Amino acid sequence: MAANKLAILISLALLSSLAAFHCHALQVGYYRDTCPNAETLVRAHIKKALRSDPGNGAGLIRMLFHDCFVNGCDASVLLDPTQTNPRPEKLGAPNNPSLRGYEAIDAAKSALELACPGVVSCADVVAFAARDASYLLSHGRVSFLVPAGRLDGRVSRENDTQFLPGPSSNLTTLVGSFAAMGMSVEDLVVLSGAHSIGRSHCSSFVQDRLNASSSSSPAPAADMSAPLASFLRRRCPASVPVAGVKDPTVAQDVVTRDVLDNQFYRNVLARRVLFASDAALLEEVDAGRMVRANARFPASWERKFARAMVKMAAIGVKGPQGDGRGEVRRNCRLVN
Ligand code: HEM
Ligand SMILES: *[C@@H]1O[C@H](CO)[C@@H](O)[C@H](O)[C@H]1NC(C)=O
Ligand SMILES: *[C@@H]1O[C@H](CO)[C@@H](O)[C@H](O)[C@H]1NC(C)=O
Ligand SMILES: *[C@@H]1O[C@H](CO)[C@@H](O)[C@H](O)[C@H]1NC(C)=O
């Protein structure tokens, strides 16, 4: 009987910890009654931001990843440094200075505060914005509904950004960091397809991919094509960039740079990707098989990408059930 009781207790504990993590159910059309134009307003502002620079779209898709993998999808990545919290996530190496798109979020949020003050969370704006950027940069091919009802977090620590996988990671590390968020190997492979848009700073890959530390006879990583290596050497400084010194950027995908498509997988197979973490997807047979399938079947990848974005956008969300863990921020850069 004691054992029985224990088993029940354990399963209850498991259930409630699962509930705390996945917790509260998000809903499509969450703002239908409280702010009917919410998603239309966000889309209009994201469209505008992309017209001025498609790179904002890449930034916004990456922003969802960096928000959700650090303390859940709660807009903690948006908080500015303050006297009481001088080192928020925003200052962490994975975000600073490379993450972009913050102004597009601010513009959308300002419009929302005019239309329906205090109703739409910044975390939902980040998720809507990533969805809209995916739609626009794929020319309508990646299209999906985003369940909403997230609350904004009040905690943001620079140190927590160390849990984001880095570009030197091997497949074991990548799979581990995704698994810690409840994301599968397939999610990892499918979402890595986002590296078909946007840019990278040279500092993110020169050291381990171009072997710039040996100035004498620099050899590229064995898994990088020679033409890409020589192109990157011309564009990137010969030595590891020092803070404050110019750190140029290059396109992630030189073939279709501003289009969210399955070109990334073709690039992986042709050894034309920037990061060790991209090339690492061929380290094991399972992931390698997924890379080849995504390279061959674009429509199937588009559907999977949409599904994986929705899944990522539900990581560790904070609900409105009065658990004291969240709020609807008035200004996405500051807690209320
Ligand atoms: C799997 C592990 C991942 C690693 C190690 C990684 C690493 C990186 C790095 C180092 C950059 C370049 C930043 C810079 O120097 O400017 C980058 C850019 C980017 N990443 Fe990832 N990433 C990963 C997964 C993802 C995921 C899951 C997404 C979204 C679904 C994503 C979307 C992007 C986008 C769109 C860019 C371009 C950003 C821009 O142009 O501003 N990445 N990533
Ligand atoms: C953050 O991490 C660094 C090194 O890992 C440590 O020295 C520092 O004390 C940490 N800061 C906080 C606020 O935890
Ligand atoms: C992957 O990287 C981790 C961390 O750097 C390392 O401990 C591990 O041995 C590596 N695994 C493989 C299979 O290379
Ligand atoms: C870097 O290049 C030097 C000289 O070509 C070589 O001996 C060394 O093994 C390379 N290091 C890496 C990590 O590839």
Image (cartoon, rainbow, N blue to C red):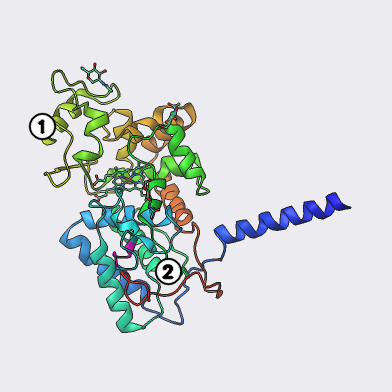
Q: Is residue 101 magenta?
A: no
User: Where is residue 226 shown, x and y percent of the image?
Assistant: 20, 23
User: Where is residue 197 shown, x and y percent of the image?
Assistant: 26, 47
Disc number for residue 305: none
Number of marks in picture: 2
* Vertical placement of residue 129 versus 161, above or below: below
Q: Residue at x 29, y 35 (%)?
A: 275
Q: What span is colored magenta in the figure?
A: 78-82
Q: Residue at x 24, y 57 (%)?
A: 100
Specify whether 47 is left or right of 38.
Answer: left
Q: Quadrant of the C terminus?
A: bottom left
Q: The residue under label 1 is which amino acid type?
A: Arg
Q: Dot 1 corresponds to which residue?
A: 234
- Quadrant in the rendering for residue 124: bottom left
Find the distance from the CA under tag 2 to the CA under tag 1.
43 Å
Name the front one of labels 2 and 1: 2
Disc number for residue 152: 2
* Vertical placement of residue 59 versus 42, above or below: above
SS for dot 1: helix
- Quadrant in the rendering for residue 104: bottom left
Q: Could you say which is closer to the camera, residue 159 or residue 38?
A: 159
SS for dot 2: loop
Residue 55 visible from this viewpoint: yes
Specify whether 216 is left or right of 147.
Answer: left
Specify whether 104 is left or right of 325.
Answer: left
Q: Residue at x 23, y 66 (%)?
A: 103
Q: Earlier in the sequence, mark 2 or mark 1?
A: 2
Label 2 crowd bin: few (<14), some (14–19), many (20+), radius 10 Å = many
